[in-house]
Amino acid sequence: MIKILSVIFLLVSHTVAWAQFRVEVSGVGLTQVPVAVAAFRGEDGATQKISAIVQADLERSGQFRGVDTSGSNLDESSRPDFSVWRQKNADALLAGSVTRLADGRFDVRMRLWDTVRGQDLGAQSKTVSQSDIRLAAHEFADYVYEKLTGDKGIFSTRISYVTKRGQSFNLWVADADGENPQSALASPEPIISPAWSPNGRQLAYVSFEARKPTIYVHEVATAKRRLVANFKGSNSAPAWSPDGRTLALTLSRDGGSQLNLLDLSVAGSEPRRIAQSNSIDTEPTFTADGRSIYFVSDRGGSPQIYRVSVAGGAPERVTFSGTYNISPALSPDGRWLAYISRISGAFKLHVMDLSSGSSVAITDTIADERPSFAPNSRMLIYATQQQGKEAMMISTLDGRIKARLAGQTGDIREPNWGPFQK
Amino acid sequence: MKRSLVVLGIVALLSACGSAVKLDNVPVEDKSANFGGNASSQGTGAADGSAVGKGAVASLDLTKSNQDAAIQSVTRVVYFDYDSFAIRPEFQSVIESHAKYIRSDKNRKVSIEGHTDERGGREYNLALGQKRAEAVRKALTLLGVADSQLEAVSFGKEKPAVMGSTEAAMEKNRRAEISYR
């Protein structure tokens, strides 16, 4: 059942590995919409089962619960018997079809029903190549999610992460469900801090290939990259401004670890210092309006999270609980701050409501790292350890529903959730 | 009798080895004018380049290659306590040895690589490793090493020397390494 795809060489090579992840969803949510995703007519004839992908996407979001649809025989033109589905307690029903065309492409269609009100919530259809069937399924899941919750779905977005296997490091780009990973970079030296550009086409990251940390900006589709920071000393923690033109980063060219801004539109431009201090200042991240930066500083004696205006001025402290708070991540809607707090030696993911300042620990694990928000602000991805092995998790913001993206290609770390594709 | 024969023998040997230039015919360079600051005499001496060419001596410095060999046996690793970048007194002599070696060749380029143990976030640990590397760099510059010869960088927790989570392993990972490029 697991097929090995042939390796496709375009301008530069990508490495495609199949079915790397198994998704395990755990936890119980407060309000989960029961949705029936019926098998698509003809989906057995394609390499990907669209209904299975859609159902897994919806369940992984934590906001949906799958309803049993075995024995159903529906497609996008069927008029369902709503009473049957109401009896099964389904609030919505998705049905569709997959038809193989003469030229080898596939015609995929769907229709969504509100089974409580007996209403047609709309249809979608696409013609795609075999290799794009998964993406079409994710786009159908986005459609269902948006119709039923009012929020944009994140199922057709991408993530990046790093694996270590022996002395080999890889930077991967995968679908948001962890499937379809492709290697963007293979290196004998470590890679850390990958960060998606706002347009989803580039990754900035720190590479140790020069036997010191330097920062590259790497175009994912072509593997073309440029070295943007190799100043004296260490160069690290790249973070994109929302307009994609500036990189905030940590440099030690003036001694210590200090925040700088680098104008990417001018090659060889001089970095500009912000938030000067005699302490460690690192891990910058922009607010969605691009006007402020949250960052980590130990200017108060231990690492805490601060906020500073890009225009200048004194930084304000944001975290006050505990003696070690690092790795800030901001939700795009501006409401939440996720970060890692060390409590009695355990490193635990916390989510702070920025309007009230109150924080909640949302995991049971003790080695959590580097949270990153989904672009619809509804989920987090982070790295942790389970049974001694590094793993990637996604979670709802309240921590109630989690899914493990369990890799088989070595220790997984440094995940970063990509933006909505434009 | 024997002794005078030896002396005669030595004199004979010396005259046989003598150069074609008779000793009393060698022009003696008058260097006294140089010390007196007499510019014209100095100028005359300097203008005659052939005197400098003949006196050129190529230098073979056995002490340098001895230094290169000697530094191999000095440890390049300085260890640190948890959460600390203070250089412990027992490493002072190690740093002195490296300072002396680096000072002996102005062209020598040295990288100081700071590391941490595995506890904590990657970027914050990169910054902590940087502090360790800079502590060693500062100690070297205080001993007269030029800053331009040194680069302090950090690997954070990315390149442990010893795998494992035991205290013994972590002790060996909290370090700064002096690396001659």
Image (tube, helix red, strand yellow):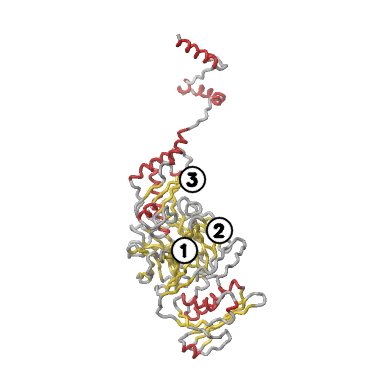
Q: Is residue A275 above or below residue B46?
A: below
- Residue A132: percent from left, percent from top: 59, 72
Q: Element under label 3? A: loop
In the rendered image, which residue does mark 1 sit on?
Answer: A412
Which residue is pictured at 55% across the width and 89% down the height?
A79
In the rendered image, which residue does mark 2 sit on?
Answer: A225
The quadrant of the image that shows the N terminus of chain A is: bottom right
- Mark 3: few, some, or many residues within 10 Å (few <14, many ≥20)? few
Give B35 or A202, whichever is nearer the viewer: A202
Q: Which mark's residue is nearer the viewer, 2 or 1?
A: 1
- Residue A347: percent from left, percent from top: 37, 64
Parent chain of label 2: A
> What's under tag 1, amino acid-wise?
Ile
- Residue B174: percent from left, percent from top: 38, 52
Using the numbered discs, state the Cα–Cα distance from disc 2 to disc 1 in whole angstroms.
23 Å
Q: Is residue A373 above or below residue A235?
A: below
Q: Is residue A204 above or below residue A39?
A: above
Parent chain of label 1: A
Q: Which mark is residue B181?
A: 3
> What's under tag 3, amino acid-wise?
Arg
Asked if disc 2 and disc 3 are in contact, CB closer than 8 Å, the reply is no
Q: Is residue A105 visible?
A: yes
> What's under tag 2, amino acid-wise?
Arg
Parent chain of label 3: B
Using the numbered discs, state the Cα–Cα distance from disc 3 to disc 1 in whole angstroms.
32 Å
> Are callouts 3 and 1 both on one chain?
no
Q: Element under label 2? A: strand
Asked if disc 2 and disc 1 are in contact, CB closer than 8 Å, the reply is no
- Mark 2: few, some, or many residues within 10 Å (few <14, many ≥20)? some
Using the numbered discs, state the Cα–Cα distance from disc 2 to disc 3 in whole angstroms.
26 Å
- Mark 1: few, some, or many residues within 10 Å (few <14, many ≥20)? many
